[in-house]
Structures are given as structure tokens and as C-alpha cells.
Image (tube, grey):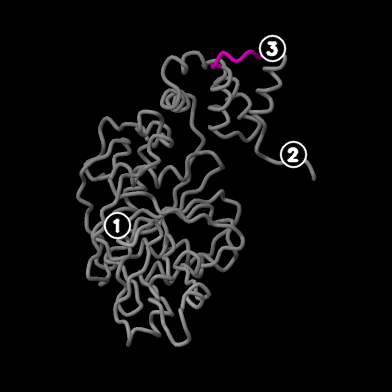
Amino acid sequence: MQQQQNPKPWWFFHGSGTPREVTIPPPPDWRRFDGGPPIERDLPDEPNAARRFGSRGRGETYQASDEELDLINAALYLRRPLLVTGKPGTGKSTVAYAIAHELKLGPVLRWSINTRTMLQQGLYRYDAIGRLQDAPKEGDRPDIGAYIQLGPLGTALLPTRRPRVLLIDEIDKSDIDLPNDLLNIFEEGEFKIDELVRARDADPETRVMPHDGTREEDRVPIQGGVTRCLEFPIVVMTSNDEREFPAPFLRRCLRLDIQAPDPEKLRRIVEAHLGGEIAKQADGLIDAFLQRRGVAHLATDQLLNAIYLTTRQIDVQHGDQEQLLNALLRSLERTGGG
């Protein structure tokens, strides 16, 4: 994100791209929950900062306006999901990574959505067959927690002291029922693991693996089979604006529309990824990209691909170079059947 010279006093997320030690303001009373006891986890910094924000690991690859930062901060204060809409390639998912990176909230928990995605997949997975196969003899009961792994949504709802950032990517691709299925989660901040609820008399506390865990010591305790957050996580949902969402779902979100970057923002993005010298060499290609974008749908990473190839001293003849650029800067919209 672009460095803000004079961030507004009420913003605690500045869009600077620079990690900061920030005290997260408490949510409104109606967005607080009684999950607990708190789970303490040592989380690394967001590992994708350099790739998403350019080689310097700063936020110039996504340039936020004051209006956009107003909405992002409002969602953070209210702890309401942020629904980010816009065409592919405009930096919608980068919003989640910028928040996690600057506020030092650990790696983003990413849940990618398609037409077959169901709520259960975001919450947890239970390997009943694996548990049965691992039982050494009839009647033995291996630790059930070893066969449960939380999904990205389930992990985000753990009762941690600092909220996690959850990216629900391309929610407009989901089955028609998924947005409505999320409503109860968004309101209650909890979910049940049915297999643990049935076993809670025998095992009132069970340790399971979070979505981003890999080691035995990463397992976290679940009390009575129910996971309930202390504060609602920071949820960023992206949509290519290809469908309408039901009003009850939209009521629980704040909506942010990301526009395609203007010429100055494009130049800053190119500089962040490829350096100032390359950005100066690319002025003509940026102008050509903007002209094409006026009549076709193009994404910023297509421009980066074209600049990278044409500035790397690759031995391409002029005619072949034109053909290559036409292929790289091809419209993302369908132009015919097939």
C-alpha cells in the first residue's frame, strides 16, 4: 500500500506496508465473545510480504486511497467482515496481506472458494477412516484429536488474544447457500466439532491441529467440543462482482470496491516490483497498457509480465516482440463462444 504522509488520527491501519507494533483497539461490546481460556501461539510474520509487496517488502504494490483506508479501518474497528469487490487483478486479496503484514498478525489464513466448497471444509476435517485403520485392535480408541484438523475459518475462530486475518477468496464462486451458511458464524463467533461434542464426557479437552500447524506442539486445546473466539477475526472476502448476495449477508459486511490503478499508481507498482530504473524504461509500455485497458479488461500483473520480458535483454525481433506483447496483454474478458 502507498505510504500515507498524513494518516488520519483515528486510523490504526495506515496502509504504509511497514510492520508496526500496534495495540488493536477493542471491538464493540456486541462483537466480543466469551471463548477461552486464551490460546497462546508464537506466529511468524506474513511470509509472502516480499512477493506481494515488491522486493523491498513494502506495500507499494497496492495503492490505497483515503476513502479505501477509511472503510478498511472502519471494518477493523467494528470487527465486521470486509467484502472487497473489483475486477480480477486489481489487488483485492492484497488487502488481507497488507493488514496482516503491517499489524503483525501472523500469516494470512486463506480459504479459496469454488462451486463445490461447503462450510464444513472451512471449519474442520475429521479423518474417521484413518483413525479406524490406526486402531491396533478392536475396541482400542486412538486419540481422536490426532485425526482432526481445523480449516482456515475454524483456526481464525480460536480464542487467541490477537485476532487472525482470514481471507475468504472469491466468495462469489460459491454455491448459492454458502453466504447464508456463514451468517450464524459471523453472528455467534463459534462452531461445534460434532465428533468432540459426542466424546466430551470422556475427553472434556482435546488437542487438535490448526490449519497452519505442522508439528505435534502446534496442536491447540478444544474445550467440550466447542470453539469460540474472544474477538471476531479480521475477515476479508473478495468477489469479482459476478453475483448478487442476499441482503442479510450484506448487512453483516462492510463493502469496498477496488478500482483499477491510475497511471501514477501503476508506475509506483512497477517500481516496487522491478526497481526505479526499469520503471523509467517502461513509460511507453505503461502508456500502451493504459490505452488497451480503456477498451479491454487487463490486470496489473499482465503489465508486470510484459515489462519484465521486454527489459531483460531477451533477443526478440521487433515483429515477434509485438506478437508477444499482444499475447501478454490479451483481454481477460471472453470475446466469443467456445
Counting residues from the start of the chain, the first of labels 3 and 2 encountered is 3
For discs 3 and 2, the disc positioned in front in the rendered view: 3
Residue 317, disc: 3
Residue 177 lies, in percent from the top left, at: 56, 68
Task: Please give the range of residues in magenta.
Answer: 311-318
What residue is drawn where x is 28% and y is 63%?
Answer: 231
Q: Which residue is mark 2?
A: 335
- Which one is in front, 328 or 177? 328
Q: Secondary structure at mark 1?
A: loop
Residue 266 lies, in percent from the top left, at: 48, 27
**The C terminus - image quarter:** top right
Q: Would you call the spot at circle 1 few (<14 residues within 10 Å), some (14-19), or many (20 or more)?
A: many
For discs 1 and 3, the disc positioned in front in the rendered view: 3
Compute the Cα span from label 3 to label 2: 29 Å
- Which one is in front, 245 or 312? 312
Q: Is residue 107 left or right of residue 311?
A: left
- Above or below, comparing residue 151 to residue 12 in the picture: below
Q: Would you call the spot at circle 3 few (<14 residues within 10 Å), some (14-19), or many (20 or more)?
A: few
Q: Which residue is mark 1?
A: 163
Counting residues from the start of the chain, the first of labels 1 and 3 encountered is 1
Judge whether residue 36 is colored magenta.
Answer: no
What residue is drawn where x is 25% and y is 32%?
Answer: 6
The reply to whether callout 1 and callout 3 are in contact (CB within 8 Å) is: no
Residue type for callout 2: Thr
- Which one is in front, 250 or 107? 107
What residue is drawn where x is 32% and y is 58%?
Answer: 79
- Which one is in front, 16 or 30? 16
